[in-house]
């Protein structure tokens, strides 16, 4: 069994690098490209989730049967997503998807990017004020964004989701507006500072990575220097953000405890094997529809929905306290229909399918961000590289947000004269 366990873990490790394989051998990009840049930040975190956290937190280490099954389900889910990416990529190539893109004849100028950036930054400030002032207070939120993020979003999640999305639109617009590397670096740094107000470590890292990706697009020769120097600094900022959450108990043990994704997954699968918890037969998937309902509009909205049905079994009452421990190992996909659910939800994963389409559209020919940027290219860049754009906004509402964004871009184009006087 030890050999099988080793093979299972080795496969999990190799699957972490599938974006590098896809970008280098399928897209024919250089070794340092947008996909591998993103990996430089995600790989250390994934290794903590997969191996170091469980090794520290679990009595039987990496040889527990339930942990190994969680790794196996994670491998199966990632492999299914990779198949979805490849199918979408090949389909896009076979039909020549570029000729079917709507609004492809409407190009955006440098001044358009500036106006869109300013407008959406002002919108971000408005919704951030509505979020912070609702309970915690703006000054309190700014002094401890992590506490605001953890404890004061309940009932105001729509403002948080819009704040993330509006800031991502503004950031992308200003990146496209910048013509010089140093201006792009300064813009990235400024938006990292602003994004730290949102209290999430992931957002901070995402803004840094997006800035690096755009430095790649302009082929800046010092990109590797910024990567080597900047990445440790960003991780230090993320650790400080974690310190704000943990406080006086902050030590190495608390850091390891933060990466309990696969410990929780092993706990779930052990309970499943012992017939202590049954499959939900679609309840997890169906109750995700509650994500469309803001709690501010429906105060009686349940706290337990979606994968929180699983969380509630092991951590009763935590969801109402806004504490929902995460489960790795494709538990959310398994919990409804078992192994077939893991495969099915992997194959229809919207992010994987879009990545296949977007990769062909952006990289089927040499891409230049200061060349011809039309409306669909702007939207594709936003969805693919915009830092957590639409992250907390479920399916249908996500498309509505994209439609409204598109309308606003077209409005800027239509009223260029008015916008020139206002901005």
Image (cartoon, grey):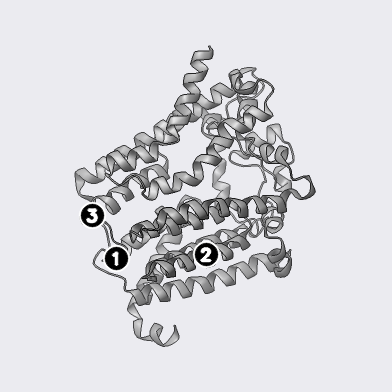
Q: Residue furthest bottom?
A: 421
Spot occupied by residue 199 in the image (x, y as percentages of width and height): 64, 57
Mark 2 crowdedness (10 Å alpha carbons): few <14, some 14-19, many ≥20: some
Mark 1 crowdedness (10 Å alpha carbons): few <14, some 14-19, many ≥20: some
Residue drawn 36% across the image and 43% down it: 353
Instruction: Look at the numbered disc 3 and give the secondary structure of its residue.
Output: helix
Residue 251, picture quadrant: top right
Residue 189: give its label: 2
Establish if 288 lies above or below 344: below
- Give the position of the C terminus as an image quadrant: bottom left
Instruction: Look at the numbered disc 2 and give the secondary structure of its residue.
Output: helix
CA gap, disc 2 and disc 1: 26 Å
Q: Earlier in the sequence, mark 3 or mark 1?
A: 3
Establish if 85 lies above or below 146: above
Q: Earlier in the sequence, mark 2 or mark 3?
A: 3
Circles 2 and 1: CB atoms closer than 8 Å:
no
Residue drawn 72% across the image and 69% down it: 139
Q: Earlier in the sequence, mark 2 or mark 1?
A: 2
> Residue beneath label 3, please?
98
Residue 328 seen in the figure? no
Q: In the image, is 62 to the left or to the right of 415?
A: right
Mark 3 crowdedness (10 Å alpha carbons): few <14, some 14-19, many ≥20: some
CA gap, disc 2 and disc 3: 34 Å
Count of labels in the image: 3
Q: In the image, is 71 to the left or to the right of 30?
A: right
Residue drawn 76% across the image and 50% down it: 247
Please tell me whether mark 2 or mark 3 is closer to you in this view: 2
Residue 374: give its label: 1
Spot occupied by residue 56 in the image (x, y as percentages of width and height): 67, 29
Q: Residue furthest right?
A: 248
Spot occupied by residue 311 in the image (x, y as percentages of width and height): 66, 36
Q: Nearer the viewer, residue 124 or 184?
A: 184
């Amino acid at each position: 069994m030890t050999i099988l366990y080793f093979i299972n873990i080795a496969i999990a490790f190799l699957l972490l690098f599938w974006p590098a394989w896809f970008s280098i051998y399928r897209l024919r990009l250089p070794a340092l490209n947008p996909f591998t840049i993103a990996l430089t930040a995600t790989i250390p975190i994934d290794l903590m989730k997969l191996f170091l956290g469980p090794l520290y937190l679990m009595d039987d280490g990496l040889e527990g049967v339930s942990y190994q099954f969680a790794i196996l389900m994670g491998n199966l889910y990632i492999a299914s997503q990779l198949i979805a990416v490849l199918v979408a990529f090949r389909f896009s190539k076979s039909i020549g998807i570029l000729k079917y893109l709507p609004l492809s004849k409407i190009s955006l100028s440098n001044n358009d990017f500036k106006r869109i950036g300013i407008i959406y930054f002002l919108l971000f400030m408005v919704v951030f004020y509505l979020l912070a002032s609702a309970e915690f207070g703006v000054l309190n939120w700014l002094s401890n964004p992590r506490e605001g993020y953890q404890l004061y979003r309940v009932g105001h999640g729509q403002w948080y989701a819009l704040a993330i999305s509006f800031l991502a639109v503004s950031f992308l617009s200003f990146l496209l507006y910048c013509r010089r590397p140093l201006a792009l670096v300064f813009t990235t740094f400024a938006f990292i500072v602003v994004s730290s107000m949102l209290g999430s470590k992931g957002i901070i890292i995402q803004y840094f990575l997006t800035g690096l990706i755009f430095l790649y697009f302009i082929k800046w020769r010092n990109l590797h220097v910024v990567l080597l120097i900047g990445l440790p600094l960003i991780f230090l900022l993320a650790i400080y953000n974690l310190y704000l959450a943990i406080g006086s108990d902050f030590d190495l043990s608390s850091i390891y405890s933060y990466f309990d994704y696969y410990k929780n997954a092993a706990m779930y699968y052990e309970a499943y094997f012992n017939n202590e918890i049954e499959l939900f037969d679609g309840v997890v998937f169906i109750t995700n529809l509650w994500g469309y309902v803001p709690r501010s509009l429906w105060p009686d909205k349940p706290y337990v929905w979606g994968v929180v049905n699983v969380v509630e079994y092991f951590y009763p009452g935590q969801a109402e306290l806004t504490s929902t421990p995460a489960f790795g190992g494709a538990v959310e996909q398994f919990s409804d229909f078992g192994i077939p659910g893991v495969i099915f939800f992997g194959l229809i994963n919207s992010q994987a399918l879009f990545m296949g389409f977007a990769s062909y559209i952006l990289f089927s020919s040499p891409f230049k961000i200061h060349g011809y940027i039309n409306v669909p290219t702007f939207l594709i860049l936003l969805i693919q590289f915009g830092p957590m754009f639409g992250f907390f906004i479920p399916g249908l509402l996500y498309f509505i947000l994209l439609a409204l964004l598109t309308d606003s871009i077209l409005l800027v184009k239509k009223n260029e004269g008015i916008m020139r006087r206002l901005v």
